């Protein structure tokens, strides 16, 4: 596929990886344009690693990491970073947990010290009271983001529909209230010792720093933390390349209009065979000129919004998801028929060079846009180091998309969009919803 | 390492240099070269905010912005979308209270072509009837979704109750269902003719480009723009009343969405910066009083924050949170207690430094992207801020004193005017709130919106 974009072709960011004796992988990427620095730490643990009866624990544990460590008080992590003029947060995903700070450049060592103190010395600060408080905070987070949000349960229903019951990606990331209640301080200690070890983590620093001084500071703060004893293997992640049928689930919810999540199983994130379905996703749903937006939102006006995305799961299989919300008054059946008609059209006729070029051009710009932020650059480097052991892949990502031909994308569509590889999660308005009563 | 590291010396930071020029027809041009990555953001700031909606046509500004790229003399909307996207970009336009902002971000090798399309869409949109009606209906659908979504519903009902019915601020910037339902393409065409023109427009170009090249592009594509468009007079923000409670009934809601506050002050108020620092201490930061109280001390919520919405006229001051239903009353009490406390005593030097060091420190982090720099320049233009605003911001924020914070709190946080809006299960929260001294209380159904009545 051709591109006129000489500017982003030439763009390469400096990437310097190394590993400490205790197994901590480090990625440095200098950029002296602005006197700020991003520190980003990925632990290779997520909800997939939770044991039976402890759904939601990986995320609850993420909250506990802000409750202090041997030399840091509860909530002091937040306070010290904000006092230094920085921003920070953490997030939990199915197969990883990340923690990140962006600070004025001269405050780099503060972030390293804070991250090292909780990696090396978390447990002395853990108390039952802190656990009880964070458990309630997380229960409120669940009410806020899942239970009291229209369509909010899709986050847990879609993976449950797409992965078999025994698969590590099947269960809820935010967790059930019952399992959150059951979490104990012993669980915290065991999870910490097993997964929060230097050899299960990647530390990335991006921005305005001197590499020699940064290396010395990293060695000083993290070098003495002991390697872990190894983590238990996950149950088998491998699944068949396709669902083997059309799975369906219909959910009644307090919503105004139907919403369809049409998912396809695709190869794992980052695999050679992942890029064609990824670009196919953009052909289908990225931008007003994409197939689904154009047909459903503009021409037929039966949908009010469309988004197509991947989960970016690097083991077993990934998911390509078309998320389409109907206009009020449109039935779930009509919505699904219209979406499926577009998918079938791609299956039958393939994709053309123009629409691939459109999707590629959008990908090129958004790739450069993402690199503007030190924090997002650092997060991508940690991601590639964690999943592929190769942070430098960041510099060749666009080339992987540019190599694709329209035939590659059409082949991926024919292999992956068929009726033997679909899962429909459909939300429909609950008959007795207060909205309907009022309209009557 | 048991001791905290000592920070090194702060490194110098300067907001990007800004070059300002104007065309003979009145178009203003602001260029900020940022050469870090191959990107350029083009932003058109038009003095065509929702506060200038014609009487009876709430939502005209928003719908006009939303439909600019639905057709020109040369291309229909579908083709325009395709053309922008083939250039790796998309045209986005939206109206807020004080302006309409249209923008795109593109790599420099595609800038010329993208800029030509951008100018065509901004200057000569045709507003095809069918596309305007389609996007009007999308707005109506969004309004229906809002009824089922507690956060959006809470924001809407708070401002609806906060301002007098005569005030434009009582109704959503994008318009409520009744007003939007009557909008047509002739309304957007008339609004465009009245408001979009060379004297109401500022072109802001940020990124990998020289001021000369950017100026030349604007001259080429906007130099012959002629129009009688002009700006509209400012609006008045009138509060509806004093301390009171509105419960919006969502039976069986597992949580209460809370909004507590009153009318704030215009952006031009001389206390602006001390209010910003005061608010950071009160509820603007994670480490603020309200968040630490409600989240970390009481575990009532996942998060709580306060903020002033800065507009040309007085926008709302509001605390936003969602709490477990059974603790609704205690959460309201704690928030009002924090309102009282910040008015009683000046913050300690330590607490003040947390806020001012944070605000000064994050300043460079906020402006990493060309889009963020362009938006900041747009905001400064809307509010007519001094040319040295960005260069002097960090020194000025560090010079705010604890006395000024106390004065700002006493003048601009007023529990005696607090409006409490609670979206939740009335069976649980009405008795809980009823035992507090919060002023008159009404319970309304989620579907009844007083701002939608005749």
Image (spheres, rainbow, N blue to C red):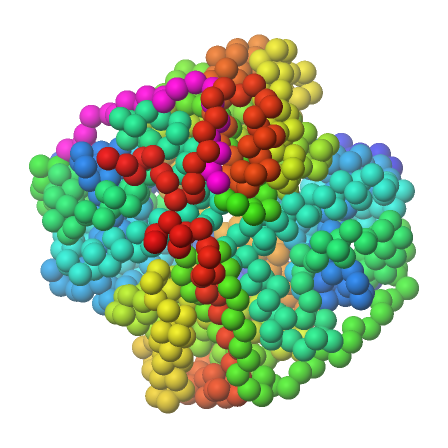
Instruction: Name the foreground residue: B422 vs B225.
Output: B422
Q: Is residue A138 above or below residue B130?
A: above
The reply to whether residue A309 is in sight is no
Q: In the rendered view of the protein, which quadrant contains the C terminus of chain B?
A: top left
Q: Residue B240: where, in percent of width, then height?
A: 36, 22
Residue A301 occupies which quadrant of the picture? bottom left
Residue B365 occupies which quadrant of the picture? top right
Q: Is residue B244 magenta?
A: yes
Q: Is residue A118 above or below residue B269?
A: below
Instruction: Name the foreground residue: B416 vs A59.
Output: B416
Which secondary structure dominates the residues rendered in magenta?
A: loop
Q: Residue A200: where, in percent of width, then height?
A: 79, 62
- Residue drawn where x is 76% and y is 32% of the image: B6
- Residue drawn where x is 30% and y is 72% of the image: A295
- Region of the chain picked out in magenta, as a range: B230-249
The reply to whether residue A417 is in sight is yes
Q: Is residue A419 above or below residue B307?
A: below
Q: In the rendered view of the protein, which quadrant contains the N terminus of chain B?
A: top right
Q: Is residue B211 magenta?
A: no
Q: Is residue A293 above or below residue A416?
A: above
């Amino acid at each position: 596929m051709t591109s006129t974009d000489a500017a982003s072709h030439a763009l390469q960011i400096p990437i310097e990886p190394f590993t400490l004796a205790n197994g901590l992988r480090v990625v440095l990427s200098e950029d002296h344009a602005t006197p700020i620095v991003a520190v980003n730490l990925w632990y290779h643990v997520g909800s997939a690693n939770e044991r039976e009866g402890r759904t939601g624990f990986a995320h609850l544990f993420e909250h506990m990491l802000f409750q202090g460590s041997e030399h840091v008080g509860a909530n002091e992590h937040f306070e010290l970073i904000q006092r230094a003029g920085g921003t920070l947060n953490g997030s939990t995903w199915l197969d990883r947990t990340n923690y990140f700070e962006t600070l004025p450049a001269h405050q780099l060592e503060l972030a390293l010290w804070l991250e090292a103190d909780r990696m090396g010395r978390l447990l002395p600060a853990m108390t039952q009271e802190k656990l009880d408080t964070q458990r309630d905070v997380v229960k409120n987070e669940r009410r806020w983001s899942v239970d009291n949000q229209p369509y909010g349960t899709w986050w847990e229903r879609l993976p449950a529909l797409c992965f078999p019951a025994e698969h590590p990606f099947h269960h809820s990331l935010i967790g059930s209230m019952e399992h959150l209640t059951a979490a104990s301080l012993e669980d915290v200690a065991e999870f910490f010792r097993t997964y929060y070890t230097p050899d299960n983590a990647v530390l990335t620093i991006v921005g305005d720093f001197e590499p020699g001084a940064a290396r010395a500071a990293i060695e000083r703060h993290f070098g003495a933390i002991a390697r872990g004893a190894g983590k238990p293997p996950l149950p088998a992640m491998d699944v068949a390349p396709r669902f083997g049928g059309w799975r369906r689930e219909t959910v009644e919810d307090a919503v105004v209009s139907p919403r369809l999540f049409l998912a396809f199983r695709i190869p794992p994130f980052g695999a050679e065979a992942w890029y064609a379905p990824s670009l196919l996703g953009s052909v289908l749903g990225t931008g007003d000129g994409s197939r689904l937006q154009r047909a459903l939102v503009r021409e037929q006006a039966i949908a009010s919004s469309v988004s197509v995305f991947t989960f970016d799961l690097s083991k077993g299989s990934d998911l390509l998801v078309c998320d389409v919300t109907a206009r009020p008054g449109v039935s779930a059946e009509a919505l699904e028929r219209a979406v499926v008609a577009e998918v079938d059209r791609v299956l039958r006729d393939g994709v053309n060079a123009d629409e691939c070029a459109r999707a590629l051009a959008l990908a090129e710009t958004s790739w450069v846009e993402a690199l503007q932020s030190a924090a997002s650059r650092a997060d991508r480097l940690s991601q590639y180091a964690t999943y592929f052991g190769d942070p430098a892949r960041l510099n060749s990502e666009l080339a992987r998309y540019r190599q694709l031909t329209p035939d590659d994308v059409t082949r991926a569509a024919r292999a992956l969009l068929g009726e033997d590889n679909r899962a429909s999660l459909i939300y429909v308005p609950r008959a007795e919803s207060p909205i309907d009563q009022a309209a009557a | 390492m048991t001791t905290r590291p000592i920070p090194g010396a702060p490194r110098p930071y300067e907001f990007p240099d800004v070059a300002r020029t104007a065309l003979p027809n009145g178009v203003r041009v602001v260029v900020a070269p940022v050469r870090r990555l191959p990107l350029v953001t083009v932003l058109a700031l038009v003095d065509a905010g929702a506060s200038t909606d014609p009487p009876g046509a709430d939502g005209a500004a928003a719908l006009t912005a939303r439909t600019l790229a639905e057709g020109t003399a040369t291309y229909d909307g579908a083709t325009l979308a395709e053309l922008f996207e083939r250039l790796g970009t998309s045209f986005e336009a939206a109206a807020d209270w004080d302006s309409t902002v249209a923008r795109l971000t593109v790599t420099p090798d595609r800038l010329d072509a993208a800029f030509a399309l951008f100018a065509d869409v901004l200057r000569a949109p045709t507003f095809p009837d069918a596309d305007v009606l389609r996007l009007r209906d999308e707005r109506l659908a969004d309004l229906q979704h809002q009824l089922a979504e507690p956060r959006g519903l809470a924001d809407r009902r708070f401002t609806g109750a906060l301002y007098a019915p005569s005030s434009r601020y009582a109704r959503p910037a994008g318009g409520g269902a009744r007003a939007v339902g009557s909008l047509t393409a002739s309304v957007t065409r008339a609004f465009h003719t009245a408001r979009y023109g060379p004297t109401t427009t500022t072109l802001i170009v940020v990124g990998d480009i020289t001021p000369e090249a950017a100026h030349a592009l604007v001259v080429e594509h906007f130099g012959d723009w002629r129009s009688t468009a002009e700006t509209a007079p400012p609006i008045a923000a009138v509060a509806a009343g004093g301390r009171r409670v509105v419960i919006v009934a969502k039976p069986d809601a597992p949580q209460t969405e809370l909004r507590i506050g009153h009318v704030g002050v215009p952006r031009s108020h001389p206390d602006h910066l001390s209010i910003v620092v005061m608010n950071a201490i009160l509820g603007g930061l994670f480490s603020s009083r309200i968040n630490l109280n409600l989240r970390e001390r009481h575990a009532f919520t996942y998060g709580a924050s306060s903020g002033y919405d800065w507009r040309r006229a007085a926008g709302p001051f509001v605390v936003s949170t969602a709490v477990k239903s059974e603790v609704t009353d205690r959460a309201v009490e704690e928030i009002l207690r924090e309102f009282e406390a910040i008015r009683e005593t000046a913050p300690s030097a330590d607490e003040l430094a947390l806020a001012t060091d944070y605000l000064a420190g994050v300043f460079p982090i906020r402006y990493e992207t060309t889009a963020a720099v362009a938006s900041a320049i747009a905001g400064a233009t809307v509010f007519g801020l001094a040319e040295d605003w960005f260069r002097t911001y960090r020194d000025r924020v560090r010079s705010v004193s604890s006395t000024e914070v106390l004065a700002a709190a006493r003048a601009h946080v007023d529990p005696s005017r607090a409006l409490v809006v609670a979206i939740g299960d009335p069976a649980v929260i009405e008795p809980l709130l009823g035992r507090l001294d919060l002023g008159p209380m009404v319970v309304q159904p989620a579907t009844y919106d007083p701002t939608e009545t005749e």
